[in-house]
Amino acid sequence: MSGAALGLEIVFVFFLALFLLHRYGDFKKQHRLVIVGTLLAWYLCFLIVFILPLDVSTTIYNRCRHAAANSSPPENNNVTGSYATVTPVTRQHPCFKPWSYIPDGIMPIFWRVVYWTSQFLTWILLPFMQSYARSGGFSITGKIKTALIENAIYYGTYLLIFGAFLIYVAVNPRLHLEWNQLQTIGIAAANTWGLFLLVLLLGYGLVEIPRSYWNGAKRGYLLMKTYFKAAKLMTEKADAEENLEDVMEEVRKVNESIKYNHPLRKCVDTILKKCPTEYQEKMGRNMDDYEDFDEKRNTYPSEKSLVKLHKQVIYSVQRHRRTQVQWQILLEQAFYLEDVAKNETSATHQFVHTFQSPEPENRFIQYFYNPTVEWYWECLLRPWFYRILAVVLSIFSVIVVWSECTFFSTTPVLSLFAVFIQLAEKTYNYIYIEIACFLSIFFLSICVYSTVFRIRVFNYYYLASHHQTDAYSLLFSGMLFCRLTPPLCLNFLGLTHMDSSISHQNTQPTAYTSIMGSMKVLSFIADGFYIYYPMLVVILCIATYFSLGTRCLNLLGFQQFMGDNDMTSDLVDEGKELIRREKRKRQRQEEGENRRREWKERYGHNRDDSTRNRNVHPDPKESNFSDVNTNWSSKYTRANNRTERDRIELLQDAEPLDFNAETFTDDPLESESGRYQPGGRYLSMSSSVIFEDI
């Protein structure tokens, strides 16, 4: 089994990263370099989290083996005497190999490759790819030029700081820094920046994750929050549609002004390919390519303006598609929560859905997850399961907060993580050591990474599921992961006292800490910042528990969900009305489809027979009448094509009028094609969300 565990985890983590990236990204539409760069960043960060417990167990075995070798008496120099002496020492030190033992020399090389690759991604490659993906250039050279210009200040700042530091070291005669020490200073600087952000995200996740599961057991709370999200999302959806129409109007003007033989026509065609299909068809019908362009009479846009327009088209189309998909997902969630609320009082203990799923379910799932099982799970078991899980996660959060505040104490050992690992180290129970380390670092990473997936910085960074995340946000998340994971692992090793700079013991370090170098070069960071700064997680947990961030955002005008707020109640009422209208609309659609199906089943065969007979024996009178009718319709359908629209109205199913609607239009076609404009004076800034659920 030597090295087999390492190989299995490498393969498993790759498919885990690929699955998550498939959930958030779009492999078909996004550029391959964006997919590969994000996948590599996520994969390396997840790999560090999963492999670190194996490094800990291997280090404990190496310490035991080193202690057994040093405990042999020096006077026994012959082979027979030393063998006889080592035997009882081996009994005193049961240094048997763990099942996941990794041979010497593999882990340092592995960590060095993983760490420096992730640092190259987060500081050099991914920022460049961000600018490249967001650029509106029409060629590879143009995109690279734009990316270099945008990152010139970013890269220049780091080069300026590093150059000033090198000059200071060269001028000062007291400092004689070697390459290894410079490397350690660079690592310490990167980890210090990551630790700043790590404590912020960790303090939020330690409180919000248990609370989210506890609130998940409250059906009324979830339903009200869904109504609140519906009201905000409708406003964002309307803004996205308006923004798309404005951009498409600019594209239409450019398309009409630049003709087929203009030098910039290829750029316009590239922009048109990024537009939605319905807008492409409209612009294609209005296009007249028979006119030549005249540089003297007309003023044409420049290439820079077309690059800017191309960038706006990419952003507006992505935002519009994302809001449309999120709206449909939110509707399904709201309908399901309303079904759960109705079925809780059911006496038959059979879960009944208002709307059936459009996709057929698997027979295996239908057999085991029947309506009875679904009722017991959704109405009885699931709330209790969420409450128990919330309590367990709360206990883990308390352990983390206590250990973050006391891990610097080595005599006595107050960190609970260090206590658990040292108890297992005495008995050399490697299975327990690896499980304890994995659960600990996995919980820490979940608290940090889930906040990265939930955070939203206006509309520039937003990880949306169901393949709706843009390239910029994917690359930005890869940068955050690569910057957060190394300080997260160092913090975990400090909590368990596996870092010699924390435990102050002359023991063999882990292979992961060995590539970081000795932090004694910067003693004020190793002995000060790394130890005392994580204590601020207590303040952040208290602020998150009392929702101070949410209250501050509400005061600034960013609407957040709060149960004791008038603005929240107004948004909940509006979202409830929106969901009610969508439900009525879907019910009318299903009723219309059922009527068509019944009509087809009853009269479909007779209608087909009569049509077939009519085709075989055409009636000359009927044909003459159809010709006359065609001539009449072509004569009197001019201005707004009203007769054609009336004919469409007669073919459509008659739907009852909604007297509860806020607006009323005489023309049903205009009401169907128009967009809903939600009222309310308090929805103006809902698209500028900083945190989704704070």
Image (cartoon, helix red, strand yellow):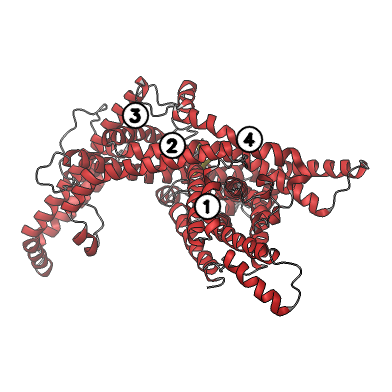
- Name the mark nearer the viewer: 1 or 2: 1
Residue assigned mark 3: 678
Decide if residue 582 is on the left or right side of residue 39.
Answer: left
Residue assigned mark 1: 423
Residue appearing at x 62%, y 62% in the figure: 64
Residue closest to the eye, 416 or 488: 416
Question: Which amino acid type is marked by label 1?
Answer: Leu
Work out how far the residue at label 4 is from the one at label 2, CA to CA, in angstroms.
21 Å
Residue assigned mark 2: 208
- Name the mark nearer the viewer: 3 or 2: 2
Q: Position of residue 270 (x, y in %)?
A: 55, 53
Residue 533, label in figure? 4
Q: Which numbered disc flags the more N-terminal residue, 3 or 1?
A: 1
Question: Which amino acid type is marked by label 3?
Answer: Pro
Q: Position of residue 498 (x, y in %)?
A: 62, 51
Callout 1 crowding tier (Cα within 10 Å): few <14, some 14–19, many ≥20: few
